[in-house]
Amino acid sequence: MAVKIRLARRGRKKAAMYDIVVADSRAPRDGRFIEKIGTYNPLTNPASINFDADKAFDWIMKGAQPTDTVRAMLSYRGVLIRKHLQLGVIKGAITQDAADQRYQQWLDEKNNKIESKRTNVGAAKDEVRKQQLAAETKVREARAEALRQKQAAAQAALNPAPAAEEAAEGTEEAPAETAEENA
């Protein structure tokens, strides 16, 4: 019996979630499976991958073949490097302690990368939010200024006589003063 580690789809239309299952390769995609070892949610950023790494490692060591997508997930979480190191121990190339130390070092580096990606995504979202707020503020101020100018123009249109009289009075007084000064 050929055993595969693969994804089984669940969830509604356009909101898929997947179970990571160990199943007979002849079984349908969403059909019968041997064991469920985790879940995968591609809709989050970054995608949520939750599975029991020890169970996955046991199945890989027993000969279960992961599909391409699951292989990428197992590699991302370190199951395949753990298998590689364990095969080195079985062949006698390295000791179990050295393999455990290398795996733990790799795992720490990977967790740091994942955490920095998570913080960078959060910081990028905050930066985009600040830029959008600044753009909205600028648009709001431009609209308010345009409204003030429109109201001032409407006010001037309603009261053109006082403005014209003031301008006329100012021009009449100036020639009279010059005439008096010449005399």
Image (spheres, rainbow, N blue to C red):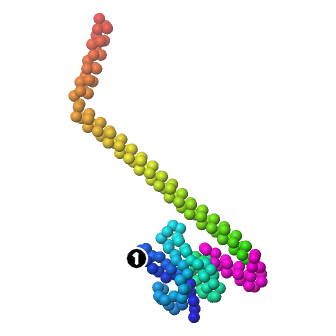
Q: Looking at numbered disc 1 in the image, what kind of residue is underneath it?
A: Lys
Evaluate whether residue 6 shows in this view.
Answer: no
Residue drawn at x 61%, y 74% as measured from the top left: 77
What secondary structure is the stretch in magenta mostly built from? helix
Evaluate whether residue 183 shows in this view.
Answer: yes
> Is 157 positioned to the left or the right of 58 in the image?
left
Q: How many marks?
A: 1
Q: Position of residue 113 (x, y in %)?
A: 62, 65
**Position of 177 relative to 106 (above/below):** above
Farthest top residue? 183
Label 1: element kind: loop
* Residue 155, quarter of the rendered image: top left
Query: Which residues are the magenta region?
Result: 76-98
Q: Nearer the viewer, residue 119 or 161?
A: 119
Residue drawn at x 22%, y 34% as measured from the top left: 158
Task: Name the quadrant of the N terminus.
Answer: bottom right
- Give the residue number, with chain letter if any, for mark 1: 13
> Is 133 positioned to the left or the right of 73 in the image?
left
Q: Position of residue 140 (x, y in %)?
A: 38, 47
**Position of 152 relative to 5 (above/below):** above
Task: Name the quadrant of the C terminus.
Answer: top left
Q: Position of residue 49 (x, y in %)?
A: 55, 74
